[in-house]
Image: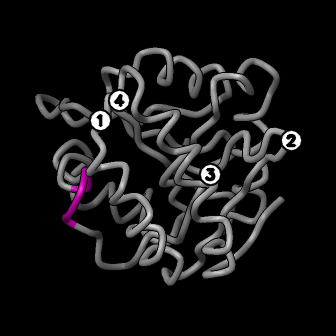
Amino acid sequence: MICYGPAVLDLSDELADAYSEVFSAPPWNEDEETIRQFSLRLQADSRRAGFRTAFAQSPAGIDGFATAWLTPKTFPRDRAYGQVSAQLGRQRVRELLIGALEIDELAVRPHARGNGTGRTLLAEITADAPDERAWLLTARVATDTVATYRRLGWHEVTPLPGTQNGVVVFLAPNHPSA
């Protein structure tokens, strides 16, 4: 199921609970403060251009979710964006990422893994990506996550020589530049 904009805030407690379960575990090991910040970020992010959330539910509650928005013309500098810029350079950021759908979070609870939940969430959230242009980043140390994106057909953007850092940038399977 998909919801757009601030409508997601009706689910914020359930999404925060799923986020906590997924990202407090290795390899993420996020602390309580970072997990608490997710709820605050969700409030701000829900007002971004093109914001949407895809989520999967079962009788147990939210099994997983993905959030995304359109990457703004002025590429952000906070969070991991500086690492993305350093690896790709301004021209490739502009060509590959600006105006594309940016998948910010993908979280699938352990009990819902291995049955296509992540694949379904990615397909739903990217279904109406502008010109099929979608991208995401993940931590290089999250080797299982990196392998999953590759297995799902996402294409790693090769870093400029000598710029590899802690993030891996992926383009969606149908991204025209993939």
Query: Closer to the N terminus: mark 1 or mark 4?
Result: 4
Q: Quadrant of residue 6?
A: bottom right
Q: Please, what secondary structure does the residue beneath circle 3 have?
A: strand
Q: CA distance from mark 1 to mark 4?
A: 13 Å
Q: CA distance from mark 2 to mark 1?
A: 32 Å
Q: CA distance from mark 4 to mark 3?
A: 17 Å
**Residue found at x 53% / y 17%:** 147
Q: Nearer the viewer, mark 2 or mark 1?
A: 2
The residue identified by callout 4 is 28
Look at the numbered discs 2 and 3 and tell me whether their residues touch, using CB distance below 8 Å.
no
Color style of the picture:
one colour
Is residue 141 highlighted in magenta?
Answer: no
* Whether residue 32 is situated above or below residue 148 in the rendered picture: below
- Magenta range is 77-81
Q: Please, what secondary structure does the residue beneath circle 2 have?
A: strand
Mark 3: amino acid: Ala
User: Observer-nearest residue: 132 or 36?
Assistant: 36
| Crowd tier of the residue under label 1, counting other residues whose Cα lies within 10 Å: few below 14, some 14–19, many 20 or above | some
Q: Does residue 37 appear left or right of residue 156 in this picture?
A: left
Mark 1: amino acid: Val
The residue identified by callout 1 is 167
Which of the numbered marks, if any, corresponds to residue 66? Answer: 3
Which of the numbered marks, if any, corresponds to residue 15? Answer: none
> What is the chief secondary structure element of the magenta stretch?
loop
Q: Please, what secondary structure does the residue beneath circle 4 have?
A: loop
Q: Quadrant of the C terminus?
A: top right
